[in-house]
Image (cartoon, grey):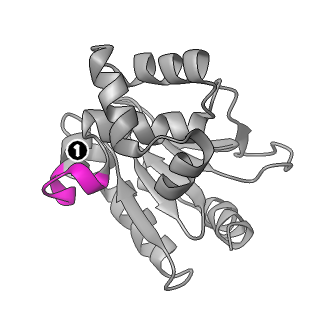
Amino acid sequence: MIDNLHKNTGKTLEDWIGIVAKENLQKHGDILKFLKENHGFSHGFANLVAHKALKTDAGSAENQDDLVKKQYQGKEHFWPIYLQLIGEIEGFGNDIEFAPKNSYVSVRRKKQFAMLTPATKTRFEIGVNLKGKAAQGILEADTKPNAMCSHKISVTHESELTDEVISWLRNAYEAAG
């Protein structure tokens, strides 16, 4: 994606980080808005530059485990959900990458197919990419503007990680290959 950023814009990632720094933008959402509105960025490229500029991506973190642990501060009761999901997802294949960010973990194959997010103190969200699939049952459409996933599944306890949840994740994994 970094190579494509240069091909598409004529500027390197470092150039864009410098542009963002000159604007003195300190919030992820502000950087996204600036790059999209002023430079015609897609959400994906704006998100890449924002994470790199703020050093909130897995590659910028000294310790990725610390990024994940920080997500669960005050939400420790969701840790068993995260661990169970990681175990299930790892069983799908050996081509999976877990990429922690500040507030979620991106799960990728050739492209992102899921996000694991302790969203609030009462809700854990599993984002899944199943573009073109109608929402049904526990699978809700993610209607947030610029959502990184097409659908989400909300759970509150590991007992809700049913075969249906795992099946939706597996479908997203298979669609990403």
Foreground of the two, 67 or 49: 49
Instruction: Decide if residue 14 is on the left or right side of residue 38.
Output: left
Dominant SS of magenta comes to helix
Query: Which image quarter: residue 27?
Result: top left
How many numbered callouts?
1
Residue 65 lies within the magenta run: yes
The C terminus: image quadrant:
bottom right
When the figure is inspected, residue 56 is found, relative to residue 79, above or below; the finding is above
Instruction: Decide if residue 80 is on the left or right side of residue 167.
Output: left
Residue 51 lies within the magenta run: no
Rate crowding at label 1 as few (under 14), some (14 to 19) or many (20 or more) other CA atoms within 10 Å.
Answer: some
* Residue at 27% from the left image edge and 14% from the top image edge: 24
* Residue at 71% from the left image edge and 46% from the top image edge: 139
Instruction: Decide if residue 133 is on the left or right side of residue 48.
Output: right
Q: According to the image, label 1 marks what residue?
A: 76
Place of residue 55 in the rendered image (x, y in percent of width and height, measured from the top left): 25, 40
Q: Secondary structure at mark 1?
A: helix
Q: Residue furthest front?
A: 10
Query: Which image quarter: residue 52?
Result: top left
When the figure is inspected, residue 122 is found, relative to residue 97, above or below; the finding is above
Residue 159 is at least partly visible in this image = no
**Amino acid type at mark 1:** Glu
Foreground of the two, 101 or 119: 101
- What residue range appears in magenta? 58-66
Place of residue 158 in the rendered image (x, y in percent of width and height, measured from the top left): 43, 55
When the figure is inspected, residue 175 is found, relative to residue 66, above or below; the finding is below
Residue 151 is at least partly visible in this image = yes
